[in-house]
Image (spheres, rainbow, N blue to C red):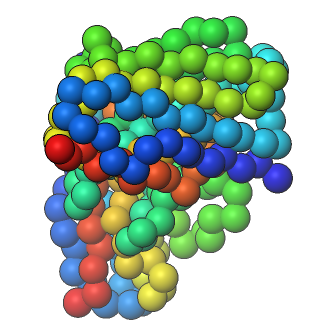
Amino acid sequence: QITLKESGPTLVKPTQTLTLTCTFSGFSLSTSGVGVGWIRQPPGKALEWLALIYWDDDKRYSPSLKSRLTITKDTSKNQVVLTMTNMDPVDTATYYCARPLRRAFDIWGQGTMVTVSS
Amino acid sequence: EIVLTQSPGTLSLSPGERATLSCRASQSVSSSYLAWYQQKPGQAPRLLIYGASSRATGIPDRFSGSGSGTDFTLTISRLEPEDFAVYYCQQYGSSPRFGGGTKVEIK
């Protein structure tokens, strides 16, 4: 069974750096073709893709957020970490990690709500 | 960067009716790269369709996807009570992108 779970702070202050961890099971990021992505959703709004990392350490970022994002993987721990710098209240959202398969995100975590407020 | 525009924004229908949702891309998208998701309140999105027309595991056959180039469609042949939700299309190119969503609500 494949599962993903997001963890991190629920509240961050403006200008701080957000660090989120996706811990997954049922697949390995050392397997060819495998990746993990991050997607967010502000309250009442649409989904927004943020970043992807693949088994070969290929990394992709949303063009509009690229300067603020870093995605890394720890294959031995089955974890993917996303950092987002200079947080702003508009970054308040539910953050999801998901596994891409066949050019779609087939398995999603439950999401973690992050509020940016002083 | 490809922009996906979904229409209508809201679709008001009754159970048993047919739902037709549109997703239009600002430039041509490979059919292999087009997916549809369903999202209910408080839940993560669920993959319905990948490759424009292939149903994901466990998805009922009342859901079907079609289209090519810049115009794609998700059709729900007969709405069940559990189908009232928000639906998103997504293109999975080098920079994945989601559409703005269509809400299917009970009339």
Left/right placement of residue A48 relative to residue A36 reads left
Q: Quadrant of residue A103?
A: top right
Is B78 rendered above or below residue A60?
below
The vertical placement of A93 against B91, above or below, is: below
- For the question of whether residue A83 can be seen, the reply is yes
Camera-side residue: A41 or A33? A41
Q: Position of residue B63 (x, y in %)?
A: 52, 66
Residue nearest the viewer, comparing A7 with B99: A7
Residue pictured at 48% horizontal, 27% vertical? A82
Residue A102 visible to an observer of this rendering = no
Which of these two is toward me, A67 or A34?
A: A67
Quarter of image, res A69? top left
Q: Quadrant of residue A79?
A: top right
Residue pictured at 17% horizontal, 62% vertical: B9
Question: Residue at horizontal 66%, vertical 46%?
Answer: A4
Q: Residue visible at 63% across and 65% down?
A: B59
The image shows residue A45 at horizontal and vertical percentages of: 23, 54
Name the image quarter holding the C terminus of chain A: top left
Left or right, residue A112 beside residue A53 = left
